[in-house]
Amino acid sequence: MTLWQHIAARIGELSGRDFRPEPPRHLGGGCINTALRLTDGEQQWFVKTNSADRLDMFEAEAEGLEAMADTGTIRVPRPLGTGTHDGQSYIIMEYIASGGAGSRGQALAGEQLAAMHRHTTERFGWHRDNTIGATHQPNARHADWIDFWREQRLGFQLELAGHNGFPNLARRGEQLLERFPALIDHDPQPSLLHGDLWGGNITFDTDGQPVIFDPAVYYGDREAELAMTELFGGFGRDFYAAYDAAWPLDRGYATRKTLYNLYHILNHANLFGGGYASQAQRMIDQLLAKC
Ligand code: ADP
C-alpha cells in the first residue's frame, strides 16, 4: 500500500465517510514538508508529509491548530489526524480553497486575531514543545514573561548560534539577556498566539474570511505576534487599524518589536546563516543602545 493509499484509508476511518481519492496532486509553497491535496471529487483534504522522525512536529502542529480552532475566533484548518507509514509521517487537515481578501478581509483578520489573543491563561509557554520553521521550539511554562523570553526564546536561539559558528553573536547576545528586562516595562498577559504569523501563513477562503495555518502555538505577549506580522510584510493597514480598535497595543511596542523579532531573525540565522547573522547582530546592538 502506498503512502497516499494508506492516508486515504485513514481519512475514511477518521471521518467515518468512505473516501476513495484520485492519485494526489502535489502542491508547492511549503518550506519544510511535502504538501498534497487528496480529493475524490467531493471531499478534499490537505496533507503534509515528512520523514517518520518528524511525527512529533506534526502532532504538535495538530494540537496547535486544534487550540486555535477551539477559540472560535479566526478560521484555521481543522486537523483530522497524524500518523506514520512506511518511513514517512503525515498530518491530515481540512483543505482550504483560497479566495481573495476582499475589501473587509484584512480588517476581519485584525479583529479576529485580537479576539483570539483575548484567550489567556495563567502562565507563559505551552503544555508541549513544538517547532519554529524546522527548529525545535521549547515552551516550558513560566509565570514571568521576562524569564520565558530569556530562557525559552532568546537564550535558546543564542546557544544554538554559539554551536552553529556564530560565537560573537552568542557573546553579544549574552549581554542583551542581562539587560533586556529594562525594555519590557509593560504587563503582558499570556495570550494564545499562532507563534509564526508571517504573511505566508495567512490566506483568505472563498468567502473572504481570513484563515491562519502552519502555527508554532504558545501563550505569550501578543506584541510578539504583531511584531512578526511586520517582519516580512503581507499585512495591510486595515489589519493594524482593526486590531488596534479591538485591543490597542501598549506604549513602548515599537522598541519591544525589535526584541521580539530578534527571536525569528536568530532562528533564520541558525537555519540559513549568512546575512541573517549580521542582521541579528545589528538588532542586538540597537537594543543594547536602548537598554
Ligand atoms: P510547511 O509546513 O512546509 O511550511 P505549510 O503549512 O506552509 O507548509 O503549507 C504549504 C502551502 O500549502 C502553504 O503555503 C499554503 O499555500 C498551502 N496550504 C497550507 N495549509 C493548507 C490547507 N489547509 N488547505 C489548502 N492549502 C494549504
Image (cartoon, grey):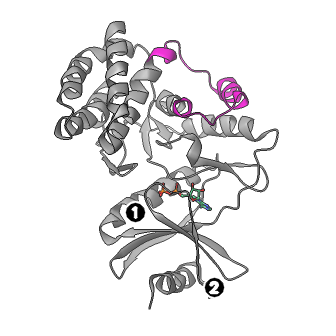
- Dot 2: element: loop
Residue 150 lies left or right of residue 9; in this view the side is: left
Q: State the CA–CA distance, disc 2 to disc 1.
A: 26 Å
Q: Is residue 201 visible?
A: yes
| Residue at numbered disc 1 | 59
Q: Residue 214 got which mark? A: none
Q: Looking at the picture, tell me which residue is in the foreground, 219 or 57.
A: 57
Give, as a three-letter code, the residue at label 1.
Glu
User: Which range is magenta?
Assistant: 229-255
Residue, x 50% and y 33% (percent of image)?
Answer: 228
Residue, x 37% and y 8% (percent of image)?
Answer: 290
Q: Residues within 10 Å of mark 2 (few under 14, many from 20)?
A: some
> Closer to the N terminus: mark 2 or mark 1?
2
Residue 202 lies left or right of residue 208; in this view the side is: left
Residue 149 lies left or right of residue 19; in this view the side is: left
Q: Name the quarter showing ligand 1.
A: bottom right
Residue, x 41% and y 62% (percent of image)?
Answer: 58
Q: Residue 22 got which mark? A: 2
Q: Looking at the picture, tell me which residue is in the foreground, 199 or 146.
A: 199
Residue 3 is one of the magenta-drawn residues: no
Above or below residue 65? Residue 93 is below
Q: Is residue 187 visible?
A: no
Above or below residue 119? Residue 243 is above
Above or below residue 55? Residue 134 is above
Q: How many marks?
A: 2
| Residue 15 on image: x %, y % | 58, 78
- In the displayed image of the protein, which residue is found farthest to the bottom? 1
- Dot 1: element: helix
Q: Nearer the viewer, mark 2 or mark 1?
A: 2
Q: Is mark 1 within 8 Å of ligand 1?
A: no
| Residue 195 on image: x %, y % | 46, 41
